[in-house]
Amino acid sequence: MANARSGSLATILFLFMFPAALHKGAAQDPVVSQNLVTDNVSVVEGEMAIISCRVKNNDDSVIQLLNPNRQTIYFRDMRPLKDSRFQLVNFSDNELRVSLSNVSLSDEGRYVCQLYTDPPQEAYADITVLIPPGNPIIEARDEVLSEGNETEMTCTAMSSKPAAVIRWMKGDKELPGKPKVELTYDKMYTVTSRLTFTVSRDDDGVPVVCIVDHPAVKDFQAQKYLEVQYKPEVKIVVEYPQGLTREGETLELSCQAKGKPQPQRVNWLKVDDDVPSHAVITGADLYIENLNKSYNGTYRCVASNSIGESYDDYILYVYDAPTTTPKPTTATTTTIITTTISYPEVNQDSRAGEGAPRTVDHAVIGGVVAVVVFAMLCLLIVLGRYFARHKGTYFTHEAKGADDAADADTAIINAEGGHTNSDEKKEYYI
């Protein structure tokens, strides 16, 4: 039995000594590997690595695998190294495949595949151990922000290998940060990224996300929601009327105010004047009945909170009440007079005048029609009187000279064709 033990010990010593001798010979006469191939391996700490030594066109040469310390892990299908984490996956004339489970940082290094040829060949497989960072930590300088202020955030990814890369997202927009990388005593990396930006009211409730990119992890991130306070945003809405504001009608305005914190008080006022005495203010609504032109002016809604004050204006211009044009008649004794009312051009609030009907054009058309009818009637009257005066009137020479006679008898005597001249014209009858 002693001889058997000494034989086994000699075999193990040979397996450990022989690779060293081969390495020494290779150093003296370097040869580029042509038939032996392998691959580099990256593995996350705690997981399994696979090392494969492959031979093309093998001529029954022996394959073995060495660790970074040049110790034999496997000689053909035998494992001299007493580390049970190494297990044989496959052995053939063309491949030696070994697995290493529960990989730790101490396993990182260059592993050697050897082929016993003349001269011997070597191929190298570098194992890189990846260590994921801890959960990212995001911190904000200010918990509650005011609109327009600048804030700062930091995100830290600790104890990783290699160093992590940190990116920032605000909503769907990426923001640039300033990274700082530190190497710790245990050869780990800690990365801290600092982000500075100015907030607006649109940022309220928007998430700021710190994204950590590392080959050992995916979708590694942390986020923090922004809380931004801002002064009110004010808007006046015309509830009634929908068109022009006219005399005698009612005006109803509603003031809509939104802010953070929410405005607690809303005030109505008239710029450079007092609000009409009979105007009614109910909460954020303003009512003015029986409008007239003395109410024209700018009405302002003011809302405020702890951040600031805002307002919106409404310009009121009261138009005349709508007028109706009388219909033209056909009586000859009636004279129709139309009056066209021209309204002054006023820069009114667009919300009070859009889509309002125009009555001035109808009045002009009615006036033109009335004038035409009146002209035709006058023409008919003149023609009627002219024909009445000249109906059946004609002149003869029988009373010529009678215009100068003193009386009727003299006129008859002096007139042409009178009886005094009857002797000059005689007629004879046979």
Image (tube, rainbow, N blue to C red):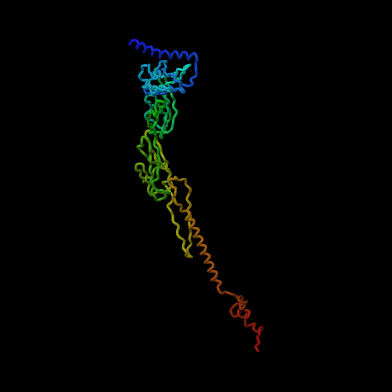
- As drawn, the residue found furthest toward the bottom would be 430
- As drawn, the residue found furthest toward the left would be 1
Q: Position of residue 146 (x, y in %)?
A: 39, 31
Along the viewing direction, whichever of 355 and 163 lies nearer the viewer: 163
Q: Where is residue 69 in the image (x, y as percent from the top left)?
A: 41, 15
Q: Where is residue 295 in the image (x, y as percent from the top left)?
A: 41, 46
Is residue 416 among what the camera can see? Answer: yes
Is residue 161 among what the camera can see? Answer: no
Quadrant location of the C terminus? bottom right
The answer to which quarter of the image holds residue 285 is top left
Position of residue 322 relative to residue 207, above or below, is: below
The answer to which quarter of the image holds residue 309 is top left
Position of residue 406 relative to residue 304, above or below, is: below
Quadrant location of the N terminus? top left
Determine the residue positioned at 36% across, 36% down: 262
Total label count? 0
